[in-house]
Image (cartoon, rainbow, N blue to C red):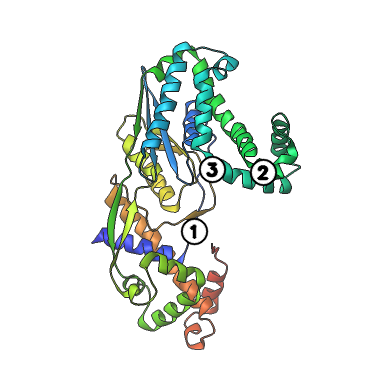
Amino acid sequence: MEERKFYSKLCVARSLKSSVGKRCLNEFVPSGWDKLSYNLATILVKDKVVVAVNLRVLSNRCEISIAKDGVWLDEDHKYVNKIKETLANISKDAPMTFKQTHSREDMIDLSSTILNYCSKIIRNRSDKLRKSITENKDENYIKSFLEFVKTRINVDDIYNDEKIVSISTVCCEWDHALNLCLVSQILYVKQNTHLFSHMDLQLLDPVVMIQPILPWNDIVKEFVDQVEYGYLKEACLKDSMIKRNLKHIYGGINVELNCESSNEIYLHPILNVLTSVMNHEEKRIFIAVSKRTCFLCDLYIRFVRDKGYNIIFSGSQKFYKKLYNRWKLPDRYKEEFMSFAQLELDQIIGNEIKYELIYDSSDDEALSMEYDEKEFERFKNMPFIRL
């Protein structure tokens, strides 16, 4: 019952709010083996999937754990195996110069494979490239990129739709060549060459389940009385974002809000990797993530850090973190963390309810009188976001 209450509150919180403002974890710039994990995460991204990678270096081998928010297809297995085989083959001939490494047929073939696998991402980046160049033409990174472009194609081709393939190729070369370069740099160090010949690479299965959830109305009524509930529901249905969220999560905005339902939830990739490697002796764990983490993943990592683990991860650290109603609790420390996280969800729901009551129903004098001026000002100045 406690789990169902937790997931039900998560759905209500997500229906009222898309993102939560929270103090950011410190930005981390990976280097060495951590950088290799980061680069692997980058070249494993296909379309809009999220990928997480952990690499452990042992005395005679390396262990790599990879998770994504979806099922591993045959195409994915072939792609990952090709990366693994190429690294193993190159490591047998290391150390080599940078030029020697990238002139090898197997490395050229791998580069072509990466281009094909990441084609959708490359197209999206090509579209964004034009906007970025136009808006940031004086920035050093744009100037550096344009200098690189001149060695490959005519710069004017960037704005030519008929040249999208060439542009995509250049973008991929610019971005992924850097990753391949850093992968190769690891192989230059002679004492590390044997590690890739003895590589234990594990693609973690997604953890998915169907979770029953309580009606939206039942959860909301724990925070307001019957009179306030009427005002609140009316205000929520006037809010286009909340109305859209309710339809998405509960399937409708009428009787659906009074009925029990179910929600497919899954363990986010970063937590899938984290919980799979926490049994090892090392307390320091670095996980490369292809996309910034969500609010509850951040919260869980903070919680685990208080248990003595030194959890470090890559990715953009933004003030606002998204809430996901399909987020799944990890099994490790489940009960303890669930109680801790539920307090956060209660606060989010409570604040958003007051926000809706004060602002969307403030024209109702009877309700407005229930909140004194001091409380009104306090909530007026709180940071809220509507996405």
Q: Position of residue 148 (x, y in %)?
A: 70, 31
Q: Say what amino acid the circle numbered 1 marks.
A: Ser
Instruction: State the SS at label 1.
Output: strand
Disc 3 marks a residue whose amino acid type is Ile
Residue occupying image coordinates x 49% and y 53%? 321
Q: Distance between the residues labelled 1 and 2?
A: 39 Å
At 52% from the left and 78% from the top, the residue drawn is 360
Q: Can residue 134 be seen in this view?
A: yes
In the image, what residue occupies the spot 28% across and 58% down? Answer: 211
Q: Which of 142 and 157 is in front in this view?
A: 157
Mark 3 and mark 1 lie on one chain; the one further toward the N terminus is 1
According to the picture, the residue beneath numbered tag 3 turns out to be 121
For numbered disc 3, what is the local secondary structure?
Answer: helix
Q: Mark 1 points at which residue?
A: 19
Q: Which mark is residue 162?
A: 2
State the image coordinates of residue 56 (x, y, percent, origin top left).
39, 27
> What amino acid type is highlighted by mark number 2?
Glu
C-alpha span from label 3 to label 2: 18 Å
Disc 2 packing (10 Å; few <14; some 14–19; many ≥20) = few
Image height of 295 relative to 363, above or below: above
Q: Check whether the beta carbons of the residues at disc 3 and disc 1 lie within 8 A of each other.
A: no
Where does the image place residue 202, in percent across and percent down from the top left?
Answer: 34, 32
Q: Which of 189 and 67 is in front in this view?
A: 67
Quadrant where the image shows the N terminus: bottom left
Query: Among all residues in the image, which is located at the extreme front?
Result: 162
Residue 157 higher or lower than 282, as above or below: below
Numbered tag placed on residue 102 in the rendering: none
Front label number (1 vs 2)? 2
